[in-house]
Amino acid sequence: MTKMFDLVIIGAGPGGYTAALQAADFGMKVAIIEEKEIGGVCVNRGCIPTKALLYASHIFSLMQSSDAFGIFTNEISFDYGKMQKYKDRSVVTYREEICQIFEEKQITVVQGRGILRRDRTVEVHGKEGKEYYQGKYVILATGAKAVVPPIPGADLPGVVTSDRILGGGDWNYHRVVIIGGGVIGVEMATIFNSLCSRVTIFEKNSHLLGPMDDKVAQELEEILKAKGIGVYCNVDEITIAKEDSLICRVKTASGEEISEKAGIVLIAAGRKPDFTGLFGEDVHLEMKDNRLVVDKNFATSEPGVYAIGDLTADIQLAHVAAAQGTFVVENLANREHSIRLEVVPNGMFVSLPIVPSCIYTTPEIATVGITEETARAYGMKVRVGHYSMNENGKSIITRADGGFIRLVFEAYSNTIVGAQMICPRATDMIGEMATAIANGLTATQLSLAMRAHPTYSEGIKAAIEDAMHLEK
């Protein structure tokens, strides 16, 4: 017998569980279907475990230089197994919080593989066998999976994706080669460099972090190299072989040949939408470039079926999926939108993204809006303020060398249109910049609020002053 619901969601990652919670708050009867763990990749094999290991490894890194602060120890060591247990506890705690809220809001959780059928029906293969759930609406939110390019030797033992590393295991990371210099690659490099591993990154593009601002990428590359991490960009050919250890051989675009030994080779070449087993033979949704085609309301070509997150978005971020889930449910419930997915300030004809992008290296990186280069490509005249964090009092106290805050303003209205930060707490401070862009704030309006001293956020005011050429 088919069970009826107002909303059926396939996938319990950030997009799916956020949509479920919002729908329940609006009084909708909700079922959410998940084949693996509640929380999806982000909670179980992505954001949360990665940040837990980054935090633990950062503490160990700080201890190695504690004598600079007048703190001495006879011996400093780490237990990778205990780090993994700390990471696992963080994941379980987060996941249990979601499950508890599901129970409080009377959301039906179905464990099993969901297959979309016609007429908004989902066939579930789980412990109870085959079941059917039908919704007035269906949201697809199955996320993404790791990409493994056709690299010779990619199937050798010891060649892994981030899923394998975050899944636990014994310490075998004295020498780590990372193929891919995107977010996953540089965050993993930061973890193992902090734990005294020899780390090398090979990236096919001309700089790290792909579409990220050139100046941010250049600054990060210099910081990583100063920490002893090998960074090679413009890599043209890659092969992996097994001799006495794994050997990763590459050739750069300039013809330089490089060989690196490794205990582990991490392939961090990005992620692609996960459609595994999602569609039955009786549904055919329109797709383009391996993504589902959706309209401005995230509706697919199948009536009553919506898709959010990595299945549709160019930007694969948990908070993007969550925002889209909220947007869809508010539409379905005929409620006013509580979040803006993009903004167009008065007097401008350029649609500005207000999606913060955060990378948890040391120091952190955060950006929102557009860069100076993008603005000029649109023909927009801008003022740019740049502040070196080497001059910041809090940075001096904490010995946080390097980094900057860079703000971009439309030249005539002095409205903020972009921000790039590379400094401690950047991932927290970028929220202020996202709010400013979403509300079309000017440099003057941003300057009205005092910023406490000494704080990293004082750099925001200094960057505003630099852009406006005010006296300091």
Image: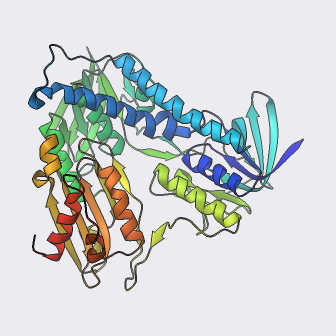
Query: Which of 361 and 413 lies nearest the eye of the viewer?
Result: 413
Find the residue positioned furthest to the right.
1
Residue positioned 24% across, 16% down in the render:
77
> In the rendering, at what x and y percent does residue 400 appear?
16, 43
Q: Is residue 14 left or right of residue 4?
A: left
Q: Is residue 414 left or right of residue 228?
A: right
Query: Which of 347 and 34 lies nearest the eye of the viewer?
Result: 347
For the question of whether residue 210 can be seen, the reply is no
Q: Quadrant of residue 181?
A: top left
365 lies above or below 165: below
> In the rendering, at what x and y percent does residue 95 appear?
56, 34
261 lies above or below 472: above
- The quarter of the rendered structure image containing the C terminus is bottom left
Number of on-image labels: 0
> In the rendering, at what x and y percent does residue 189 appear?
27, 35
> In the rendering, at what x and y percent does residue 365 appear?
28, 50
Residue positioned 49% across, 46% down in the render:
272
For the question of whether residue 336 can be seen, the reply is yes
Residue positioned 31% across, 67% down in the render:
418
111 lies above or below 346: above
Residue positioned 77% across, 51% down in the render:
29
Q: Quadrant of residue 226?
A: top left
Q: How is the image coloured?
A: rainbow
- The quarter of the rendered structure image containing the N terminus is top right
Query: Which of 95 and 470 lies nearest the eye of the viewer?
Result: 470
214 lies above or below 75: below
Query: Which of 471 and 183 lies nearest the eye of the viewer?
Result: 471
